[in-house]
Amino acid sequence: MVIVGAGFGGIRAARQLADAPADVLVIDRANHHLFRPLLYQVATAGLGPESIAIPIRELLQSQQQNAEAMLDEVCGGDPERKVLHTSSGKEIDYDYLVLATGGMPNLFGNDHWREHLFHLGNLRAAMALREHIVACYEAAAYEEDEEARRALLTFVVIGGGPTGVELAGALAELGRSVMPQDTKRIDPGDIRVVLVEMADRVLTPFSEKLSVSAQTVLERLGVEVKLGKPVTDVDGVGVVIGEEGRLLSRTVCWASGVKPVPLGKALGLPTDRSGAIEVAPDLSVPGHPDVFALGDGSTYVPPGSDEPLPGLAPVAIQMGEHVGKTIARALEGRGRRDFAYFDKGMLATIGRSRAVLQRGGFQMAGFTAWVIWCVVHVWYLAGFRNRLKVVLDWIWNYVKFRPGARVLTLEAGDGFGEPEAARSARRSRPALPLPVKESDRDAA
Amino acid sequence: MVIVGAGFGGIRAARQLADAPADVLVIDRANHHLFRPLLYQVATAGLGPESIAIPIRELLQSQQQNAEAMLDEVCGGDPERKVLHTSSGKEIDYDYLVLATGGMPNLFGNDHWREHLFHLGNLRAAMALREHIVACYEAAAYEEDEEARRALLTFVVIGGGPTGVELAGALAELGRSVMPQDTKRIDPGDIRVVLVEMADRVLTPFSEKLSVSAQTVLERLGVEVKLGKPVTDVDGVGVVIGEEGRLLSRTVCWASGVKPVPLGKALGLPTDRSGAIEVAPDLSVPGHPDVFALGDGSTYVPPGSDEPLPGLAPVAIQMGEHVGKTIARALEGRGRRDFAYFDKGMLATIGRSRAVLQRGGFQMAGFTAWVIWCVVHVWYLAGFRNRLKVVLDWIWNYVKFRPGARVLTLEAGDGFGEPEAARSARRSRPALPLPVKESDRDAA
């Protein structure tokens, strides 16, 4: 039994198989399960990277005895022969396969923007953004050229969904409340955070009332919200926003589209136009009853609905639980059931004490929603230690307004201590210069 | 007033000037003050990088109103004209100058080894080592070639001083006690940690009795201690240890010599053969009463002694305090005093519950010394929050034997989210493609 992807869905599927007579292999490109909803706080120095990630091995070991992790990338395979291929050249057999590979940024055809964009795709990218933000403030403190200084202090977020709103709010608070404590050389009035959204309101998945509420809070924090504006270009100098023209910025963050990781196509499975794997009501792939897909990498239109389920964590979690149970039942010779999604609602936070909440017809905005947001996020975070760390950091940041993670590790220096080995160990077959003579070997 | 270097000495010198009628500028290549004695725990996943570093701005702001930080590297200057030059092209005037630039790894002429060595020079290098260690275990879990697997599981530490002993002990515990909890695919017996020391005992600054005690503990932890053995080569395959021949290893760590950062020579100041700045009894540089040097970058032979003071944190701290006080007194028109070092003793820890302590004639080894080691290290750590984090992490690691920082951020991926901007913001004059047309500018 192979699970590809250790996100919300993959980990839940594995857990359901804890007592099943099966060997579960979880393959992921990272060695950790990442709590993505808090990634923007890592990028804005509120949390350390270790607080929202847990080694997959530790997570599996804490929940079950029959699972192993593999750090690798599945790049293809043959569902007929029931085999997968990995980037490092391994061939892996499976009886059941769960594809929980998630999504990746969608630039809508503008792939040449990639080299100029920050995003919140993984821990490394979030840390690169954090270091970059801190470096921009450090450079701005002594930059004498007015234009260059403004570009260093202008932060652009493209996309007004929950991620974009949360990131923009955190960037604004960092700029207005935290950084000025560090130096008198930066005028907080020079710091600009711009949120660009093509639709005519932010948080489109939420009700219009909550959108307006969120926008008001953002603007109170100092975020410039530009609605109904397409970004027409991104380059090394900044962005071009529709007819408004060029906005000079050293920090342009992509928080817009997500598309499925294109593994479905590589495996020859049925996909929709975006590349998402189509699944039957039991979440298996039509024509491949032993292959399941779930989460952002899949597309499932529930009976009686016109729209596929959204790319949300609760969807992936519930799908993972369903798939795990289905396989466990199949191993006992029992039949399959259809997946039914229970809508747990949506949450988004804006700044450090406001959030919006929507669940069915119920909606709510303000401080209480923010408290609920905090509780829900800590609840779903994996690992007691990480929960403790996040809560302590939040209390500290709330009281002191001084996030601790403003440390720049990209120290000027000569790179000593980062040998080629640091980059090559990840190759599963290390590039040892062979042959090594017998007489040359460890004589000890 | 300019202080170059925000290590133990530089920060203490700044603090003494808190109430002085002076503007204090602290220039450092990093944006953080680093608690170097615990760096080996970051490298071995025991602590997160944020726990032992604090932004220089935050540290200064918490202790005084008259100080600013600058993220830059001093590369030269002219003590006659009282001016410094930085890597980013700035020219900085000073009235008083404190050189607290510290040391850098000394490869004793084997500079071609650099590209193959890990070391504990700064936060980034420590994190590179941590990621590499975790990656080696991940790769070893699925490596089928016996020789390649052994190389992945062999960790070599060159240098048996306190840093080397502490690192080797931590590597051994990681290998024997922590990693096997994560996977059944690695036999703890296959993991080798080798400590190579040219002298005939480890911890040469300590007494022979303590050296023997430390070695016994190391060997009990599973470290192979090779004494009186020179390392004659380091390459991408491993190390060559004297006549023992080649030892295949993917992880070779340098914990041997330290030499001064060569700024003294660049400024035309009197230096000894190693490049350390010679100082008078008041710690000023002979011929330059307004220039002071301290810590690892200086050399001072106390009256009545044959040897210069050792490169220890307490020496740098006391020198920093003396220099700060001297300048504060000078600003009040008061005279100078000679520096007198008060020997606070030496400590080194071996593994998670043993340490050695020596102070004057008094010496001690074992659990009590380790408790003292813990207390002293937390005491000297800057910032209440960092102290709290370290103590909580230590308790957790001690009880659970599962350090939390085994997260690999070097995720396989396409590098999206690390634009060129991430690397170039550090240049103080950002490389904006100019000229930007007036009409092209931010129209908002």
Image: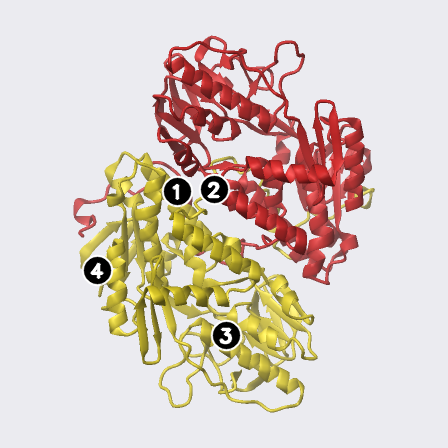
Chain colours: A red, B yellow
The answer to whether tags 4 and 1 share a subunit is yes
Q: Amino acid at mark 3?
A: Ile
Residue type at tag 1: Ala
Q: Earlier in the sequence, mark 4 or mark 1?
A: 1
Residue contact between numbered discs 2 and 1, judged by CB atoms under 8 Å: yes
Give above or below for A326 relative to A135.
above
Image quadrant in which you'd find residue A146: bottom right
**Which numbered circle lies on residue B317?**
3
Q: Position of residue B379 (x, y in %)?
A: 49, 67
Label 2: chain letter: B
* Label whose residue precedes the other's in the sequence (2 or 3): 3
Q: Are marks 1 and 3 on the same chain?
A: yes
Left or right, B193 with reference to A2: left
- Mark 4 surroundings: few (<14), some (14-19) or many (≥20) residues within 10 A: some
Please check whether the numbered discs 2 and 3 fall on a single chain. Answer: yes
Residue plotted at (49% across, 13% down): A285
Placement of the C terminus of chain B among the 4 image quadrants: top right
Marks 2,3: beta carbons within 8 A: no
Which of marks 1 and 2 precedes in the sequence? 1
The chain carrying label 1 is B
Numbered mark located on residue B135 in the image: 1
Q: Is residue B130 above or below residue B89?
A: above
Residue carrying label 2: B410
B433, above or below A210, in the image: below
Q: Do the residues at discs 2 and 1 belong to one chain?
A: yes
| Separation of marks 2 and 1 at Cα, in angstroms | 9 Å
